[in-house]
Amino acid sequence: MRISYKLRIFLLLSLVLVVTSVGWSVWRYASHAEEREAYEATIERLRTQKGQIDSLEAVIGRLREDVQAEKARLEGAGERIGHYERRAVGGRLPTPQYRRYRESIDRHNEIVSRHNATLGRVNALYDEYADLVSRHNTLIDSANAMQRRAVEKGYQLPAAELGVE
């Protein structure tokens, strides 16, 4: 079976078109490899930061529970001190009661000291958390800008699932 001359030309041109199209696609894919790598690195940094944010949220949550427990202990210690102060006559307590009153004040002061230290840790963690969230949001903006540039240039970056709620 002989293939006609026109059919040969058509098949040759079709083959050239297919090879050119495949070559063009491979070249475009390879030419944007750097952008894809940068995007994937950005997504990996976002995942790492998300893990750090989640971890800080858990630590802050536990410390807030500690703060609430310390507040309850402070209220109890304050009530004990108030009890002694209400029983004072002319601003004075009998010696045995005064010793217990002083012990109650010392315990109260220890609780206040621990409470203040815990609040200091909570505030430091809130500062760290705010800084991390700010950097995370900046990185999200960067990833979004990379996606927009890719769409404008006519190529696609890999879909990224960050597990964000």
Image: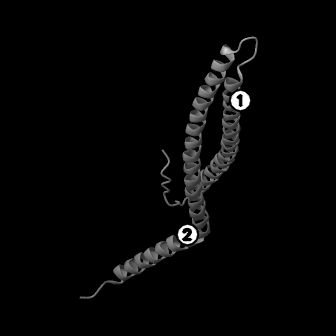
Q: Quadrant of the N terminus?
A: bottom left
Give percent across and percent down for residue 147.
Answer: 57, 54
Give percent across and percent down for residue 133.
Answer: 64, 46
Q: Nearer the viewer, residue 51 or 141?
A: 51
Q: Residues within 10 Å of mark 2 (few under 14, many from 20)?
A: few
User: Which secondary structure, mark 1?
Assistant: helix
Question: How is colour applied across the structure in the image?
Answer: one colour
Q: Nearer the viewer, residue 3 or 153?
A: 153
Residue drawn where x is 56% and y is 35% of the image: 69
Q: Which residue is mark 2?
A: 28
Q: Residue furthest front?
A: 95
Residue 102 — which label? 1
Q: Is residue 99 left or right of residue 154?
A: right
Residue drawn where x is 60% and y is 35% of the image: 70
User: Which secondary structure, mark 2?
Assistant: helix
User: Of callouts 2 and 1, which one flags the residue occurring earlier in the amino acid sequence?
Assistant: 2
Residue type (three-letter) at the residue carrying disc 1: Arg
